[in-house]
Image (cartoon, rainbow, N blue to C red):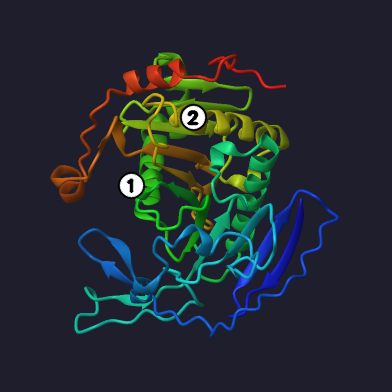
Amino acid sequence: MKRTTTRLADGRELVHYDSRDDLVRDAVDPRPLDPTATTSEIRYDPLLDEWVAVASHRQGRTYHPPTDQCPLCPSRGGHYSEIPAEDYDVVVFENRFPSLTGAPGPLTTGDNQELFARRPGTGRCEVVCFTSDHDASFADLTPEHARLVLEAWTDRTAELSQLPGVEQVFCFENRGQEIGVTLSHPHGQIYAYPFITPRTERMLRALDSHREHTGGQNLFDDVIAAERAADTRIVIEADHWTAFVPHAAHWPYEVHLYPNQRVPDLLALDEAARAEFSVVYLELLRRFDRIFGQGEPPTPYIAAWHQAPVNHPSRRDFAVHLELFTIRRTSGKLKFLAGSESGMNVFINDVPPEAAAARLREIATPGYERKARHQ
């Protein structure tokens, strides 16, 4: 992998990740852009013990542009995009409309010092362009290209973890207008948060509680071992990765993908796991597009990497993993977060996890066995 760093016209950083070492990335962004102006803060919710980001400048972000004006396509034929190059492999750049940005700032309060705490929205938001092909999807990538995306995620995790004030790095992809995607070009995002996210905090509390009640056992290890023993929800077993539908899946079709050797983040994956990841993950994505049968539009999904927080004392006990799920529950119907889910955070799943796992095994690529062994 070759890494080349440059700057866009307004000063934002852009990084090329190329599979060839001989490529030269020296194009200059010709657009007359003013420096990016952002206003972001985080406010503390004392009832839920969590932070909420407020970023009013995002109201003006790009919204469903025509294909010939896509800001994530290469700059060609007089169209100047966010990527000043006629072609690219994988590109990462600072979001023009970030939810989190800037350096750490002091905690301030309103009239009530305990209830109205706020501070600057420290952090960073980046866009990851998986390919220059506007009409492709992640599932269309070759294993070699998908591996390059993994290396980009890993490199960004390493760099963003070192920024002042950053506590957690989150790599993810939203795919499909049903999810809320406003740019159809295949891409994902990376958030560097100035706090540990509420979902991760809950995992860490469960991890600590399980260790205390079992005399030192690891919750992630025990869950994966139990899923393998139950067997009914396993989707793929490979040499270095296991994919399964969790026992209490929240979403109609939801798969968790874990490395067989527990590590806290992407940086700690060994070479064997990195090499095999692309094959397993591409197989999962291709199955997701076949869930509802031929003739159906591409399946909308969210793919989310859960990594250990940067500085938490239980970091070494955390297990990096990817959670992949769709909000489509059946052909032509979506799973909306209604009263129980949005109001009380109590999910009601329309598809039994065992049935979802059986369907995902049924639509495997011909020749791809559930207990896959990749050479």
Furthest residue to the right?
A: 22
Q: Is residue 30 above or below residue 172?
A: below
180 left or right, relative to 143: left
Q: Nearer the viewer, residue 63 or 365?
A: 63
Mark 1: which secondary structure?
A: helix
Q: Position of residue 269 (x, y in %)?
A: 65, 40
Q: Which residue is mark 1?
A: 178
Q: Is residue 33 above or below residue 308?
A: below
Q: Position of residue 336 (x, y in %)?
A: 23, 43
Q: Quadrant of residue 359?
A: top left
Q: Nearer the viewer, residue 340 or 19?
A: 19
Q: Nearer the viewer, residue 43 or 90?
A: 90
Furthest residue to the left?
A: 339
Who comes first in sequence, dot 1 or dot 2?
1
Q: Are marks 1 and 2 in contact (CB under 8 Å)?
A: no
27 left or right, relative to 130: right
Q: Is residue 360 above or below residue 163?
A: above
Say the numbered circle drawn on residue 221: 2
Q: Quadrant of residue 361?
A: top left
Around disc 1, counting alpha carbons within 10 Å, would you say few (fewer than 14), some (14 to 19), or many (20 or more)?
some
Quadrant of the rendering where the C terminus is positioned: top right
Amino acid type of the residue tagged 2 in the rendering: Asp
Residue at image location 62% in from the left, 58% down from the top: 156
Q: Is residue 160 visible?
A: yes
Q: Position of residue 367 (x, y in %)?
A: 60, 14
Amino acid type of the residue tagged 1 in the rendering: Glu
Q: Position of residue 296 (x, y in %)?
A: 37, 31
Residue at image location 49% in from the left, 27% down from the top: 243
Residue at image location 39% in from the left, 64% down from the top: 63
Around disc 2, counting alpha carbons within 10 Å, would you say few (fewer than 14), some (14 to 19), or many (20 or more)?
some
Furthest residue to the front?
A: 77
